[in-house]
Image: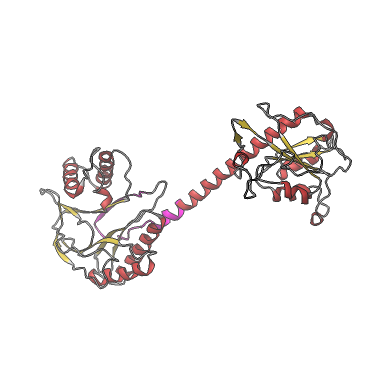
Amino acid sequence: MPVPVPRQRAIPAVESGQAPAATASGGPSREEAPRTDGTIEKHNGTTHLTLLVIEDDPGGSTLVPELLDAAGNPIRVRTARNLTEAERLLTDDVHCILLDLALPAPVRGGDDELAVLKHVLELAPRHAVLALTASGDAERGTEAVRVGAQDYLFRDELDSRLLSRAIRYAVERKRSDTAERRLAEGRLRAQENRRLERGLLPTPLLEGSSLRFAARYRPGRSRALLGGDFYDVVRTPDGTVHAMIGDVCGHGPDEAALGVELRIAWRALTLAGLCGDELLGTLQQVLEHERSDEEIFATLCTVDIAPDGRRAGLCLAGHPAPLVARPGRPARLLPYDNNGPALGLLPGARWPRMQVELGREWSLMLYTDGLIEGRVGVGKERLGQDGMVEMVRRQLSEGLQGEALLRAAVGEVRELNGGELTDDVAVLLLDRTG
């Protein structure tokens, strides 16, 4: 069955100039390196398209004048008489396949008229495919496009101009389809990741408590919802409110996963009645078992607020001390003289629990070091705890509280840094009013 495309004699592709010349090591030369991403390769400013024709006419085809691309450069042509030969010639520098649908189907194809096309699509998922069918058989051609071909052509109407244009169109359409599919897959993965991360963020358990809660969280990883910082707040049956905030060293997904494990472990241990040194010692065991590297550690701050709301116990494991603000008094940091080591640094470490008086009305802010380690201006100066305390004092004097206070604090730190912060930032606020 004649196919009006250029026919080659049975000579190696390299000899005919249609395939990359081999280097001394047997691979393609650098000048004609194949591409695996579906893009069109350019060499010395010239674009080269390669067409693989698959048809089985033993008597030779009617020759068509030279095929040219949009820039007038010749389109290289390879010819295969069967699928076995096509598989050998289908190297990565082939951009388009012209397939005769009348080619004998693979044995496994049965009575399926498009079995040969489906086989080629499985064989060459990254290549553009043009289906060649009999004149007037538009239904078969349309079905070929539905199955996966980029276009179809009638054998009797084919000429060099039509074929050249169809090749260029098919290659660009395949590239566009591939890019669109990858974009859709990327969006789907991002949506799944966001749903997963959102489900791992804490839901405070404060039912029955008169304390007001607010939190602000900004992961340092681009396009992420979850970082190595973690926090949680729960109220136990005796009326005690327990709050925690922590920071796993590092900023990747492994650190984020470890932070989630520590948060969940803290909640379970707290609800089971553990507190202070006993709780932190158990958390250190969890970290040591779950971390991927022995050098990974985590800082932690825990606060347990008595049912009457007037006093609290404080434990610090290498973590910055919380900030407390009371009416008529300037905001200040809670004592941190008995700060213990970060979790995972010292086997058998201890974390003393300090008793602090809060009073009748207060605001308690727990935060990670991402809030205080941002730069101030273009120099090397950091905001630090003192700078943060002054900033929060000013914002409180302006009447900010709750979510508005945290939003303003994180926003100003980012502004002082001159742009997005590279470290994770977590801040939570507990308020008790009269």
Q: Nearer the viewer, residue 129 or 330?
A: 129
Rendered position, 53 above or below 230: above
When asked about the image quadrant of residue 249, the answer is: bottom left
Residue sticking out furthest to the left: 328
Q: Nearer the viewer, residue 233 or 388?
A: 388
Whether residue 208 is visible here, answered yes or no, is no
Identified at 32% across, 66% down, the residue is 266
Identified at 75% across, 27% down, the residue is 161
Q: Position of residue 114 (x, y in %)?
A: 78, 47
Rendered position, 210 above or below 287: above
Q: Is 207 a magenta residue?
A: yes
Rendered position, 182 above or below 160: below
Residue 116 is left or right of residue 128, and the answer is right
- Which region shows up in magenta? 194-220
Q: Nearer the viewer, residue 168 or 77?
A: 77
Identified at 27% across, 38% down, the residue is 415
Residue 6 is left or right of residue 301, and the answer is right
Count the labels in the image: 0
Whether residue 281 is visible here, answered yes or no, is yes
Q: Position of residue 287 (x, y in %)?
A: 34, 67
Q: Position of residue 35 (x, y in %)?
A: 61, 43
- Please name the colour scheme applied to the rendered image: secondary structure
When asked about the image quadrant of residue 158, the answer is: top right
Q: Is 219 a magenta residue?
A: yes
Quarter occupied by the N terminus: top right
Residue sticking out furthest to the front: 24
